[in-house]
Image (spheres, rainbow, N blue to C red):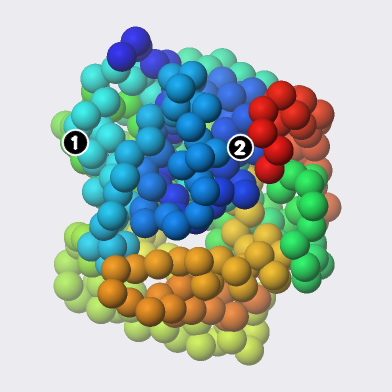
Amino acid sequence: MSPINLAICAIFQNEAPFLREWIEFHRLVGVEHFFLYDNLSDDNGAEILAPYCSEGLVTLLPWPISFENFAQARAYNDCLERFGADIRWLALVDVDEFLFSPAVRNLHTVLSEFEHFPGVVVHWQVYGSSGCTSSPEGLVIENFLYRAPTDWVRNRRLKTILNPARTNRVLNAHFAEFKNGALAVNEQGTPCQVRLNNRSGGRRWAHALQRVRNRIGRDLARYFPKIPMDPYNWTPTSLGQVSVARLRINHYAVKSAEQYEARKRRRREPDKEWSGLRVHDDTRFRYHDRNEVYDDILLPFAFEIRQALDEGMVI
């Protein structure tokens, strides 16, 4: 494999309607290759990805591992082990997350400022349903234009762009452990310390306490969805301030109510019926359905994405 300056690794399940827009967007901002782990999909995602695989843009790997068995972190670590030697920067993001720089078009320009660091962490900006109950036609970046306030507590969540040569292992969906105790930094160069309080690491008492906090938070969010706490956070960090001037991830966490409902029923776990109903429940939708701020920052990409989609198969 030829050297890759910037690649994305993602694990997905039944995301066929969204794959092409997501790929074409990230091509526009400088992503050169995609390592995509197919986690038990039963839609036509492989067919949609076939032209990209033939082009050499996508490496598609089957990944029939339960999420309860750390499927996501294991996929990321598999990517590191098998392909990391050929990659300068590897971004770990999901198919509902759009990574970009608000300051410049090409991510390479920004990442060149972080050559001395093992990784960069990037904050979310969570988008809600924009009031859509049914599934709208068109692009995600056109349909969902309302988001939570910039400094909302859930927007403190981070995803990592890492240097594989300086990475020991990926810890979970959000963070990695780097060699020689080094730390990733945010866009301002501030080091990010992580407290691992989930099942994959950390002290047992910390995990138990985090479980209690999150359970209380979810119970409160059922009745008060705008509660100023994050009941879905298992890895607190030292970064309390949200900073998205140079690097940012638009996280389309719920899309429309109909699409969210479909996502519940699409999610599959081996030998577990309706597993998505447990993970993607109504409380999670109401909590993430934040629409206070109109923000069309990605609309300028829509024309070029549509051009690219028109040249291939129609989604």
Q: Is residue 167 left or right of residue 141?
A: left
Q: Amino acid at mark 1?
A: Asn
Residue furthest top as drawn? 2
Asked if residue 291 shows in the view, the reply is: no
User: Between 29 and 166, which is closer to the camera in this rendering?
Assistant: 29
Q: Are marks 1 and 2 in contact (CB under 8 Å)?
A: no
Asked if residue 267 shows in the view, the reply is: yes
Q: Position of residue 308 (x, y in %)?
A: 70, 25
Q: Is residue 314 left or right of residue 61?
A: right
Q: Secondary structure at mark 2?
A: helix
Badge 1: few (under 14), some or many (20 or more) residues near its Cα, within 10 Å? some
Pair 1/2: label in front: 2
User: Between 125 and 284, which is closer to the camera in this rendering?
Assistant: 284
User: Between 7 and 239, which is closer to the camera in this rendering?
Assistant: 7
Residue 62 vs 115, above or below: the answer is below
The quadrant where residue 110 appears = top right
Q: Position of residue 90 (x, y in %)?
A: 38, 29
Quarter of the image with the N terminus is: top left
Say which residue label 1 marks: 168
- Picture residue at 39% right of the left edge, 16% below the top: 4
Say which residue label 2 marks: 20
Q: Is residue 106 left or right of residue 298?
A: left
CA separation in Å, label 1 and label 2:
32 Å
Q: Position of residue 206 (x, y in %)?
A: 24, 71
- Picture residue at 53% right of the left edge, 72% below the top: 264
